[in-house]
Image (cartoon, rainbow, N blue to C red):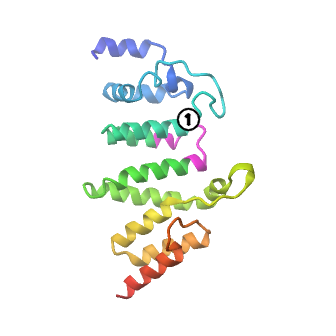
């Protein structure tokens, strides 16, 4: 795309997700190259398609602004554009409809992508640890929302940031820190979606600490 095409694009009425969630200022603040990547990865729904004007839970998209940006960030990451994906993840945490439950899933999905790159990029692991800590810090706010199932019945659900951080600390030989995560999970009655459970993991870590 040449300069004149880019200028024309700025003048055109932007529609799609960007218009629907009033993200025009953010989108046009990105470089031409970044805008083109987003349009190539997401397709016409990003800036061209008309989206129904629904103000709360979007009936056409079935997603909030925060959920939509999180989805886009994952698509961009998996297409090989990590730096741009992280910008979109960061923007998702500033969404107008930002809320603890959606924020939790943004953290979980971002952590997962970073963790997969831990061997090739030590900074990815450090960022993953940071996000796990942020997610764990909001457990009191998030867990009641996660546990609320259909018809108001409570369900067991894995709060994966606890397990991921415990695993990371164990692999780093930071057994005391891993035990602290187990204790925190037990304190908050976090469901352990493993055979050993939190008590079993804690005992395993204690044995490693004693060796």
Q: Secondary structure at mark 1?
A: helix
Q: Residues within 10 Å of mark 1 (few under 14, many from 20)?
A: many
User: In x, y percent, where is residue 65?
Assistant: 55, 35
What's the magenta region?
90-102
- Specify the farthest residue to the left: 120
- Specify the farthest residue to the front: 195
Look at 60% across and 27% down and name the residue there: 60
Look at 43% across and 74% down and name the residue there: 177
User: In x, y percent, where is residue 25?
Assistant: 48, 27
Look at 46% across and 25% down and name the residue there: 46
Does the stretch in magenta take in 135? no
Q: Is residue 42 above or below residue 181?
A: above
Instruction: Please name whichever residue, 177 or 161, is drawn nearer the observer in this view of the structure.
Output: 161
Residue 191 occupies quadrant? bottom right
Q: Is residue 89 above or below residue 189?
A: above
Q: Is residue 7 above or below residue 27?
A: above
Count of labels shown? 1
Does the stretch in magenta take in 95? yes
Residue that numbered label 1 is attached to: 65
């Amino acid at each position: 795309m040449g300069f004149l095409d880019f200028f024309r694009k700025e003048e055109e009425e932007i529609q799609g997700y960007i218009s629907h969630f009033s993200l025009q200022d953010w989108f046009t603040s990105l470089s031409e190259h970044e805008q083109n990547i987003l349009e190539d990865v997401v397709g016409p729904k990003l800036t061209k398609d008309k989206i129904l004007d629904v103000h709360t839970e979007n009936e056409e998209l079935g997603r909030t602004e925060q959920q939509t940006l999180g989805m886009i960030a994952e698509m961009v990451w998996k297409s090989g554009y990590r730096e741009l994906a992280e910008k979109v993840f960061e923007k998702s945490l500033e969404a107008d409809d930002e809320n603890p439950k959606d924020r939790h899933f943004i953290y979980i999905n971002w952590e997962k992508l970073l963790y997969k790159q831990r061997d090739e990029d030590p900074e990815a692991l450090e960022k993953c640890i940071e996000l796990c800590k942020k997610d764990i810090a909001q457990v009191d706010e998030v867990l009641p929302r996660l546990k609320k199932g259909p018809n108001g019945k409570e369900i067991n659900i894995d709060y994966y940031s606890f397990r991921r951080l415990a695993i990371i600390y164990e692999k780093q030989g930071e057994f005391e820190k891993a035990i602290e995560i187990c204790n925190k999970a037990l304190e908050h009655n976090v469901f352990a979606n493993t055979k050993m459970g939190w008590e079993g993991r804690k005992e395993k870590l204690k044995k490693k600490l004693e060796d």
